[in-house]
Image (tube, rainbow, N blue to C red):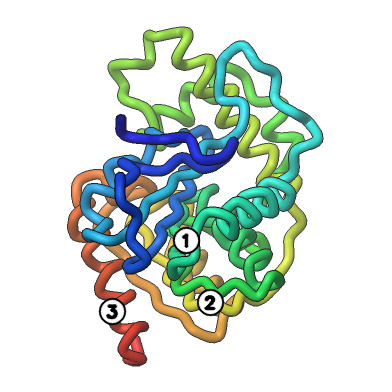
Amino acid sequence: MIFKKKTELLWQYKPKKMASKKGFSFFLAPFAGGSAASLSDWFEHLLQENDDGYIIQYPERQADIEFNKKVTLKNLAKNIANDIVQLTNKPIVLIGHSFGGVLGYEISLILDSLNVKVELLVVSAASTPKVANFELNKILIKTQYDWIKDLKTSQMIDTNLIQNSELINMSIKSLRHDMILLAKNPQHNSKTQTFLLAIGGDVDPKVGLSDLEAWEELTDNFALSQFEGGHFYYKDKLPDVMNYIRKVMAKIANNYII
């Protein structure tokens, strides 16, 4: 069993029989349209012996369920933050890719308000809520062809699976839902109290260097790094990316200036 469902929104990666009080608790937030399986391989290169790994399973990922139109990104973040408080007493690390980066940032703000410290927030290939400019009307009028084109261009789904109509329909439904959440999320520039690491691909057509740099305004402690690649730059260099995150954590722990 790779995951064990701990709450409606958080699944634990390979839960241990004997829990340790040492180590970190990592919480991963997938990209728009993603699920618990989307970033599961990150844990293989990220977790050390006493660490716990949790991944956000976005609500209503089944193909036959209509999405709850009352759900907002902030409400989702609030529910996840409350679950995190109940699940762990270990130092917290939040990591999110693309849509998940914005969600991780919103979660960090709520944990700040609860006086729960986050050791590190990693936003991967994500624009800030202030910079992000997703027009709701453009999302609502997208056709099936438009969504499939997006899936191919972003390399979010294996091109060999494009012919699987059931999988494609579910992927499009999930992606559309998450993009609507992002478009409806108010633009703001609230500061998080945690150390923020922004990372991304150096040829990402969606999130460029200036988008990553914009995160510096939202924290007093900031670092930035780019890797070779596009929006899903990590796919062929996952060990290097995860190792870099651990190095940043070590420097923070030793009060080094990054």
Residue at position x 75%, y 38% from top? 71
Nearer to me, 54 or 229: 54
Going by the numbered disc 1, the residue's amino acid type is Leu
Q: CA distance from mark 1 to mark 3?
A: 15 Å
Residue 201, position as x, y percentages in the image: 34, 57
Instruction: Using residue 114 as the reference point, say whether residue 46 is left or right of it.
Output: left
Pointer 3: what residue? 250
Nearer to me, 107 or 204: 107
Going by the numbered disc 2, the residue's amino acid type is Thr
Pointer 2: what residue? 194
Residue 85, position as x, y percentages in the image: 59, 60
- The mark nearer the N terminus, 1 or 3, is 1
Q: Mark 1 and 2 residues: CB-CB less than 8 Å, in contact?
A: yes
The quadrant where residue 177 appears: top right
Residue at position x 31%, y 21% from top? 159
Pointer 1: what residue? 94
Nearer to me, 146 or 221: 221
